[in-house]
């Protein structure tokens, strides 16, 4: 099954948020309450993020896994640095419309 992890990232100093997605194949799917670990998650903030919603489309053999939103409230790292760390580890920025389709 194609698994699409989705996380919303924003900062208290920025008006703009970013929707990030990482897609991979898996024989099992996460469920609400699971903690997802990924090398793209910067270690200064979290070791993993909680699954808050899972939408399964069996016809397409895929699911969208929404992770708890991240708001950077410490300025030890900038939003841009965190986003670059995610991108360097296979995450890509998407629009909200892309997530819905």
Image: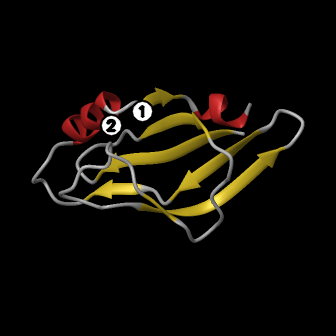
Q: Residue at x 29, y 29 (%)?
A: 88
The answer to whether 97 appears left or right of 58 in the picture is left
Say above or below: 52 vs 43: below
Q: Residue at x 17, y 57 (%)?
A: 44
Residue in the foreground of this view, choosing between 5 and 1: 1
Say above or below: 86 vs 51: above
Label placed on residue 82: none
Residue matched to label 2: 86
Query: In the structure shown, which secondary structural element does the residue marked by tag 1 occupy?
Result: loop
Which image quarter holds the C terminus?
Answer: top right
The answer to whether 58 appears left or right of 25 in the picture is right
Residue 32 on image: x %, y %: 63, 67
Identify the image quadrant of residue 49: bottom left
Work out which residue is located at the far right of the displayed protein and give it: 59
Q: Residue at x 34, y 56 (%)?
A: 71
Count of labels in the image: 2
Residue matched to label 1: 91
């Amino acid at each position: 099954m194609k698994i699409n992890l989705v996380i919303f990232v924003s900062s208290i100093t920025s008006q703009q948020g970013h929707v990030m997605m990482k897609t991979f194949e898996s024989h099992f799917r996460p469920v609400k309450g699971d903690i997802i670990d990924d090398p793209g998650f910067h270690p200064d903030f979290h070791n993993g993020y909680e699954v808050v919603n899972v939408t399964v489309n069996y016809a397409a053999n895929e699911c969208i896994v929404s992770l708890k939103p991240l708001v950077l409230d410490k300025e030890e790292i900038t939003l841009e640095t965190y986003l670059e760390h995610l991108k360097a580890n296979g995450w890509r920025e998407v629009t909200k419309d892309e997530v819905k389709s």
